Amino acid sequence: MNLFYHSLARIGQPVVFDSSEATHLVKVLRKKSGDIIDLTDGNGNLFRAVIEIGKRETTATMFEVDIKPRRTEFLELAIAPTKNNERLEWFVEKAVEIGVERITLLHCEHSERPHIKLDRLNKIAVSAMKQSLKFYLPEITEMISFRDWAKKNETILRCIAHCEADQPRQLLKNVLKENVATCVAIGPEGDFSKSEIALALDNQFIPVSLGNARLRTETAALAAVHTFELVHQK
């Protein structure tokens, strides 16, 4: 199954593919006018659509829809972007493939990357969604300071993964609960500061560990996503 994406997909209304999707349809898959494709809008709708290939644009008109249920589990993974942008992009791709509802970008005291362009990350997320045959596109938020995020976060189960050995931590897999909205915060390569950890604890965050190994930021974040997925496997 080849899955395509267009955020404006609606029954009976043609949409125009961007150049990359059009090229993939025509040059790679050798599709022709009148062919039927599968397409999602990233909001849980799987459409059947007929394509029309013109000289200047390629369009799709949706004629059938199958509404896919959203999973009952909700995971927000909050991560301080890595200095190497390729590592962050790798994380986004793999996290979307495994399963995550929101990726929040954090600015921490030890952060090495104060600004992120979301366009590239969103494109990677769309590609990963299509690759893994998912029908909900995760939200990727603008960067926010850890302090502001921690204070206003109202997720039911809030976790902070840090490396402070002198503070008690539980294994993440032992903290997670079925059907409970969860967020996990992963700090920068220099870890969360002591004051950030204290702030999180004051706001009912549970300190967690991802195991005995000292992991890179993006590895730790992906380990958290995978742990969540395994615990919630049906």
Image (tube, helix red, strand yellow):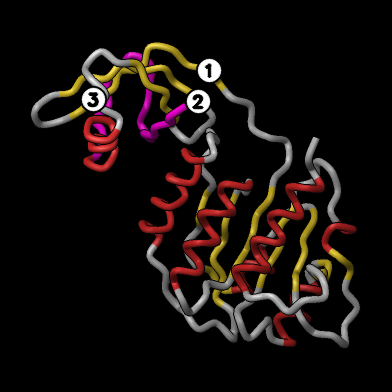
Q: Nearer the viewer, mark 3 or mark 2?
A: 3
Asked if the magenta segment contains residue 8, the reply would be: yes
The spot of residue 65 in percent (x, y) is 47, 16
Looking at numbered disc 3 in the image, what kind of residue is underneath it? Thr
Residue sitting at 25 percent across and 13 percent down? 34
Answer with mark 3 or mark 2, whichever residue precedes in sequence.
2
Q: Which residues are magenta?
A: 1-18
- How packed mark 3 is, by other alpha carbons closer than 10 Å (few <14, some 14-19, many 20 or more), is some
Quarter occupied by residue 39: top left
Residue sitting at 86 percent across and 65 percent down? 171
Residue sitting at 67 percent across and 82 percent down? 191
Separation of residues labelled 3 and 2 (CA atoms): 18 Å
- Label 3 with label 1: CB-CB less than 8 Å: no
Answer with mark 3 or mark 1, whichever residue precedes in sequence.
3
Looking at numbered disc 2 in the image, what kind of residue is underneath it? Asn
Residue at mark 3: 59
The spot of residue 220 in percent (x, y) is 68, 68
- Label 2 with label 1: CB-CB less than 8 Å: yes
- How packed mark 1 is, by other alpha carbons closer than 10 Å (few <14, some 14-19, many 20 or more), is few
User: Is 112 drawn above or below residue 159 in the view shown?
Assistant: below
The image's mark for residue 66 is: 1
Magenta span dominant secondary structure: loop
User: Is 101 drawn above or below residue 110 in the view shown?
Assistant: above
- What is the secondary structure assignment of the residue under circle 2? strand
- How packed mark 2 is, by other alpha carbons closer than 10 Å (few <14, some 14-19, many 20 or more), is some
Answer with mark 2 or mark 1, whichever residue precedes in sequence.
2
- What is the secondary structure assignment of the residue under circle 3? strand
The spot of residue 202 in percent (x, y) is 81, 74
- What is the secondary structure assignment of the residue under circle 1? strand
The image's mark for residue 45 is: 2
